[in-house]
Image (cartoon, rainbow, N blue to C red):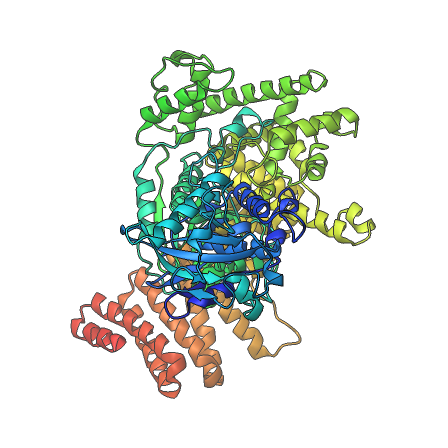
Amino acid sequence: MSGWRWDRTAEPAELAKYVQQDLARKLLPKELAPDLPGPGSQAPAEKARLLFDVFARRVVRYVDEPSSSVAGRQTLRPVDQVLGRPRQATCLDMCVAYAGACLDAGLHPMIVVLDSRRGQPSHAIVVVWLDGSWSAIGEDSYPLVGIVHQRVPATSDGFSLPGEVRTSVGGSGSFLAIDVTGATWRPGAPGPAKDWASAVRDGAAMLTAAESETGGWRWAVGVDVGLARHTTPALELPDWRPPSFEPLTAAYTDPHPEAGPLTQITARRGVVPFHARDELDLLLEWADAPSSAPDGVELAVVYGVGGAGKTHLAAEVCRRLDKAGWYTGFLAKHPAPERTDLAWLSGVVSPVLVVIDYVEDTGTEDVIALVKALRGREGPTRVLMTARSIGHWLSSIISGAGRDGVSSAKPLELPLPRRHPASAGVFRRVARRFAQLPGMSATSVDKPPDNPRWTTLDLVLQAWLAATGLSRDALPTQRDRLYDTILEREFSYWRRTCLKRKLPEYSLDLFARAGAVLTLLAPATRARATRALSAVEELAQPTPERAIFIDVLTGMLTPDSAADGFVLRPDPVGERLVLRELSSARDLMDRCVPPDPSQDERLITRPRGPDARAAAEASIVEGFRACTVLTRAAEQDAPSATELSRRLLDRHPHLWPAGFTVAMNQGGPFATTLTELAEREDSPLPLAQLANEIPPGHALRNLALTATRRSRPRPDPTASETDNLAAVAAWWNNLAIRRGDVGDRAGALAAIDEAVTLRRQLAEANPAAFLPNLAMSLNNQAIRRGEVGDRAGALAAIDEAVTLRRQLAETNPAAFLPNLATSLNNQAAQRSEVGDRAGALAAIDEAVT
């Protein structure tokens, strides 16, 4: 559902159409829905109180009027955005939602809008009749029959509405005026703005003031929803359905009581305080600035090494904007296949900020689907992405969105230094915060040991150790030692927790290997965690002790969201653990990584039902995760990560697509491993496919060259001689490009010369079919000859290319004019190289024209 526009001047009575029935109970959680009163025997005043109480317990955030509203026309949130997601409301939104719940309970509501005589914003309240029900109204019982829209407080036969309103909960009168906004919560408040008694007292005071000429309020609009519902039905919502899951997860989550120390201090747990930095101000300015994107969706990327503070920065941006009335959060990792939840997100009235953490791990299609769903929103719309580095993933998103008709402005690219500029300040502030935690104490250490390689995370971990009592001289001076010290303390905590559960005193080594397995695969369920941990020798057999052990571990590794899986965080610490443990026990990785689903006997012999499909999908996800973790870990130890990636693909060759996808987006160790795999005579890789999929100039240029070189087309006996020759000519042309990408200028020239020779032969036999290809290769040949210093040869090649493309453009301008312009630009450069300035000017002038 999207927002509605209510024109209070032209069509004030239309407000009643936006009041929905039979939805409040569906939108409330199971612990609140039963408390909604129905049209039973309870007194109307008690029903109104119960409704107010339920609304207050729903924790609806108060926000200002949407920026999309214009003078006299306010954008209204449908009830699902008030009671469902994102649970934000203005005073009028609350009144509309509350009035709908009143109708469900048999109460007769009226919505009254009051204007301030003191220059403050207008305000809305709900007035409830206490002497009957809206559905069984008679002219003799209801004093305001026939008056749906009231421009002034209603009066009839001596009746005055303000005079009949109870001034307190226990007062007399046939109406209650309720300041429903009192049930909303302000940012950071421990409870709702008002209790029931205050909401009733303040509502009555506002109406009384509106009756007085000198009061602070002036009656603006009164719409009797109970009367209107007899003649005016609510707007139909045939396509309404709540999202199947939460599209955005909260920026900060409450620490789980069973979580281990490391999980407690991860960026989104809110334990580590955020330290001010310029990048936060830049992102807040980016969010508030007018959009320059044609479709209204502004993109930004924060990138930096693991531990730089990207996730914490993004979470803090969310928190600040949330306080300003935005709907913000981190995108759930597994959207529904139909992506209906993203469509719902596009209808949110509030400004929207979506964070995609580690965007390089998110499917390009999912990001494009998000941008498509959000385009065209009236309110501010921002997508903030975090990544270790800028890579092919970003160009894929932009180009893919463009192909789908989405025009976005150039993303804001914001590099994050590896360490916060106020290092000492971060250390001291975090140490003070840790000193407040159980078992920790204040420290006199004011800064960590000097090391230019520290990240912001490293400062936090050093502060943690200082708060445990370590002196500055005892603090680690190197990252590996720092992480190992932290891991030792973490696993000691795990062991103590296991002892409390009456388990044996396991070795720290067992916890280390178990943690490495979980971190490598990030199993999303306890069943998948059990499957993975069965690779650990001591946990191979299903015993009651193993079940308790896994219960303890998964409890301590509670993820930020269900889709994140059970892993040891912060990520750089987990990546150090994976490198350390799996490098010394490589057979453990062999055993824990899921087998090829198409070859897994357990999946083959089991009926192909939903469980089998889910297991196969989980295996694919975990294999992709393993490739991702090893790629990230290369930041700390590239040789070890590369060696593990070699072993992974050697033992699990079916994972090459995952390794290839990760390498395409991020580079890293799988670029080397896949190139080596492509060189093997028995290579399992589809070389011709890879040769076509890797874009020219990509970081995987060595793999692209190897795949191209080893995929020369063989003669096809079913094809014609011409087709076979054309395939070889195209291969030579591509080989020239690949050789040029790796700096082999002589080899590139030799290859393009072969391509030109073959394509000239083909064009002589069939000009219509092959002249365009010959012109393309001649253009390429000119570039390659220029690179080796053959200026005359380069000029001759480009002159011929221009001649051919001019002929083609005369015949088919739409198809060939862009190619002619490209060659003319090249011709201008080549003529300039030989000193023909006039010829160069003529060529570039024609190219521009």
Q: Where is residue 699 in the image (x, y as percent from the top left)?
A: 44, 51
Q: Where is residue 660 in the image (x, y as percent from the top left)?
A: 55, 51
Q: Nearer the viewer, residue 639 or 391?
A: 391
Q: Determine whether, in the image, residue 50 is placed left or right of residue 734.
A: right
Q: Which residue corresponds to the image point at 40% horizontal and 35% vertical from the top-left? A: 308
Q: Which residue corresponds to the image point at 49% horizontal and 24% vertical from the top-left? A: 483
Can residue 543 be seen? yes
Q: Where is residue 36 in the image (x, y as percent from the top left)?
A: 62, 47
| Relative to 455, residue 25 above or below | below
| Relative to 227, residue 660 above or below | above
- How many numbered marks does the figure carry? 0
Q: Which residue corresponds to the image point at 45% horizontal and 70% vertical from the top-left? A: 755
Q: Which of 112 and 383 is in front in this view?
A: 112
| Relative to 415, residue 145 above or below | below
Can residue 733 be seen? no
Q: Determine whether, in the image, residue 719 is placed left or right of residue 793.
A: right
Quadrant placement of the C terminus: bottom left
Q: Where is residue 395 in the image (x, y as percent from the top left)?
A: 43, 57
Q: Determine whether, in the image, residue 134 is placed left or right of residue 223.
A: right
Q: Nearer the viewer, residue 244 or 27?
A: 27
Q: Which of 836 and 772 is in front in this view?
A: 772
Q: Residue furthest front?
A: 158
